[in-house]
Amino acid sequence: MDFTKHLLFLMLQFLVVLGGDTKPGVRLDIQDKHVIMDNGIVQVNLSNPEGIVTGIRYNGIENLLEVLNEEYDRGYWDIVWDEGGENRTKKGAKGKGRFDRMEATNLTVIVEKEEQVELSFTRTWNASFQGKLPPLNIDKRFILLRGSSGFYTYAIYEHLKEWPAFDIDNTRIAFKPRKDKFHYMSIADNRQRFMPLPDDRIPPRGQVLAYPEAVRLVDPVEPEFKGEVDDKYEYSCESRYNRVHGWMSIDPLNSTGFWLITPSYEFRSAGPLKQYLTSHDGPTTLSVFHSTHYSGADLIMKFGPNEPWKKVYGPIFLYLNSLSNGVSPNKLWEDAKQQMVNEVESWPYTFPASKDFLSSQQRGKVQGRLLVRDRKVSDAFIPVCGAYVGLAAVGDVGSWQRECKGYQFWTITDDKGYFSIINLRPGDYNLYSWVTGYIGDYKFDKIINVTSGCELNVHELVYEPPRDGPTLWEIGIPDRSAAEFYVPDPNPTYINKLYVNHTDRFRQYGLWERYADLYPNKDLVYTVGVSDYRKDWFFAQVNRKKDNGTYQGTTWQINFNLDRVNTNGSYTLRVALASVHNAELQIRINKLEADPVLFSSGVIGKENTIARHGIHGLYWLFSVDVDGTLLVQGNNTIFLTQPMNTSPFIGIMYDYIRLEYKR
Ligand SMILES: *[C@@H]1O[C@H](CO)[C@@H](O)[C@H](O)[C@H]1NC(C)=O
Ligand SMILES: *[C@@H]1O[C@H](CO)[C@@H](O)[C@H](O)[C@H]1NC(C)=O
Ligand SMILES: *[C@@H]1O[C@H](CO)[C@@H](O)[C@H](O)[C@H]1NC(C)=O
Ligand SMILES: *[C@@H]1O[C@H](CO)[C@@H](O)[C@H](O)[C@H]1NC(C)=O
Ligand SMILES: *[C@@H]1O[C@H](CO)[C@@H](O)[C@H](O)[C@H]1NC(C)=O
Ligand SMILES: *[C@@H]1O[C@H](CO)[C@@H](O)[C@H](O)[C@H]1NC(C)=O
Ligand SMILES: *[C@@H]1O[C@H](CO)[C@@H](O)[C@H](O)[C@H]1NC(C)=O
Ligand SMILES: *[C@@H]1O[C@H](CO)[C@@H](O)[C@H](O)[C@H]1NC(C)=O
Ligand SMILES: *[C@@H]1O[C@H](CO)[C@@H](O)[C@H](O)[C@H]1NC(C)=O
Ligand SMILES: *[C@@H]1O[C@H](CO)[C@@H](O)[C@H](O)[C@H]1NC(C)=O
């Protein structure tokens, strides 16, 4: 650094310090129908006592939220719920539930200092609300700190012991930035684009495709979007990567960014792989805490009539940034990502005033090391790098992917297999893991009791994945995803330009229809040793559409040659699925007409992953015993039949298939 630069740097530091000292304190103004928090950078306007964000003033813009929307439709917490058990409504039984905007009835000022204002908007349940409101006490909190370019929000949900049974399908916070300014959306480094206007989705500008969320833009206001498909599910994201996303208002002289930052996913349902909506056309920016998306009815949160429950969702940070001279949108995105890192490093936050949000001193830590021993292949204890290890509610092996009521805490192993899971809330947990490259799920057999300040060490844990003998052949990579298989190009009529030539090409609309284009009459045949799963294994076993508009189930074949067969022996077929929707997997060997079938999964799965462009939903592993008498020396064929045929969205995504010789 040369002298001038050094001097400049010092002066800047001085200015920053000076600036810090002179930042105005946070002011609170409680009016009849509104309450306003203002720190001189951001002004947040909330309805009183409902606790709905009606206005956000920032960077000289009077309101960043959509002023054309009603006040209640700009920034709000909501819940989709239903009565429990036999009282769940018919509509609810189909997974729709009832919508509640969680309007509070009482405002309490929790903190009012120069450094911080914290507001609590509460709604207390009693029996007179039975069947009308979810049986929950709700406490929505909003925090504005001095000098902060944004605000925090979190909420505490509580169901008391004697209250009725009920279900939660979905809960989240939604923000609707104004459509005249926010046109550029960003979810990841390689997932950002200029977006169409919400008006473009409405007929005749937009044409609804196979379901209302997917719209083809036939006459958009901006011609550049003509012919593209818009669908919010193309922008979903796994929890582990869903930490910052949002919108930018781009003006060469004066750009503004509007971001949601989620510093921890401890409060989100169902672990690191659960996919959630993020930002999408509207403009809309969501922080979803619980949903059934990509999982189905298994993820409806069901509470019994005598089930006390309390959970803290958040805090999350609504972050605003701006730049004022000829910037590329990338600068605001890079700054938002940096802010996300800062928030992650500050977790757990020190400032939330609710005693239900635990400070780092109240939390514990568990460390250890994970090794894999793939018996029958090698006796080695293999340290694995990058394996997910987590604590979640006490349950069965693999139960974390359906677990919603508690908190989950995950980390990944280092290159020697060591892990350290920090910031654990006290309670009883099981430790779970899964390892890319190996099938199955690990669970440590002891319950782990986390207490405040504890530092537990579980030492060396050994995962022995399911294995009866050496591999005769395998298809795919055991990684809980179908991404390595053949993902076709979309029909040119259904393109989202963002995903052309993209690593996430599976997010294009309508890929399910491409199967019938590629296999118009005969189904897929895969020959071990000749075929390449990256080219020859379609990413989903979907139905074939016939000319008369009906659908037809399919039977895929795996051909393989065995030089020798132990007809007295036995073999094991491992079939790992990355997702299933209303489908049945039937397996037969060498006789397509075999009855009974060697294996049937029964009709399983409600994950709706094919329609929602996910490349995985829930993980399923089936191990099928194959008697040696079923096999022959020479050519053999495994038939994979999926007979359910009432919709284009029914089907199976495979993760990995392997034949083992047992003995
Ligand atoms: C707060 O929002 C309401 C509704 O949009 C508006 O009438 C009121 O003027 C706002 N208050 C301030 C101080 O901006
Ligand atoms: C940005 O634009 C707003 C109005 O759109 C204006 O009030 C504000 O002063 C501008 N900020 C800068 C730094 O130019
Ligand atoms: C409502 O808020 C006031 C203060 O704003 C507080 O004194 C009172 O206890 C609250 N009532 C309930 C039922 O929470
Ligand atoms: C239930 O709460 C409402 C709203 O606070 C109140 O008006 C009503 O009296 C309460 N009913 C009972 C039975 O406590
Ligand atoms: C169903 O509703 C009835 C009447 O409100 C109630 O008595 C019963 O406990 C409810 N059942 C459950 C499972 O909540
Ligand atoms: C875990 O620890 C807490 C607090 O010490 C205790 O109340 C609880 O019973 C313990 N649970 C188990 C399974 O040991
Ligand atoms: C996609 O990538 C290929 C090879 O990298 C290139 O030839 C082709 O032009 C690209 N297509 C589009 C639409 O960008
Ligand atoms: C539609 O066509 C398929 C064969 O292409 C046939 O099996 C089926 O019966 C037809 N269904 C109707 C309702 O015409
Ligand atoms: C199968 O077992 C029978 C009887 O035990 C034996 O005679 C035969 O050699 C065995 N065949 C093979 C292939 O091991
Ligand atoms: C076995 O299958 C291969 C590939 O499909 C084929 O080329 C070969 O002729 C078959 N052999 C026998 C004995 O059927």
Image: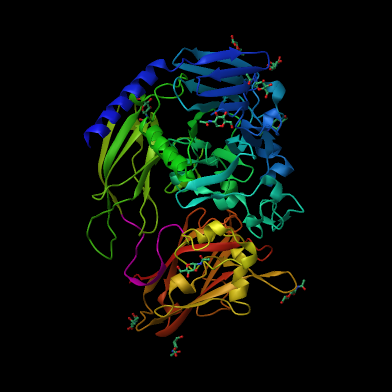
For the N terminus, the image quarter is top left
Q: Is residue 38 above or below residue 311?
A: above
Q: Which residue is farthest front?
A: 4
Look at the image and tell me whether residue 276 can be seen.
no
**Can see residue 41?**
yes
Between 482 and 349, which is closer to the camera in this rendering? 349
Q: Residue at x 49, y 34 (%)?
A: 322
Where is residue 651? Give x, y as percent: 59, 63
Q: Is residue 417 left or right of residue 468?
A: left
* Colour convention: rainbow
Instruction: Determine the main secondary structure of the stretch shown in magenta.
Output: loop
Residue shown at 47% from the left, 45% from the top: 328
Position of residue 383 measured from the top left corner of the image (x, y, whole percent): 25, 53
Residue at 29 percent of width and 30 percent of height: 9
- Which region of the structure is painted magenta? 464-481
Left-right relation of 661 to 623: left
Q: Which percent across, then down, holds residue 662?
A: 34, 70
Of residue 385 and residue 427, the one placed in the foreground of this image is 385
Toward the right, the furthest residue is: 204
Kindly indicate the quadrant of the structure image that contains residue 68: top right
Decide: is 391 above or below 275.
above
Ligand 5 quarter of the rendering: top right
Is residue 477 shown above or below 71? Answer: below
In the rendered image, the vertical position of residue 589 relative to residue 488, given as above or below: below
Closer to the camera, 169 or 327? 327
Place of residue 254 in the rendered image (x, y in percent of width and height, measured from the top left): 53, 36
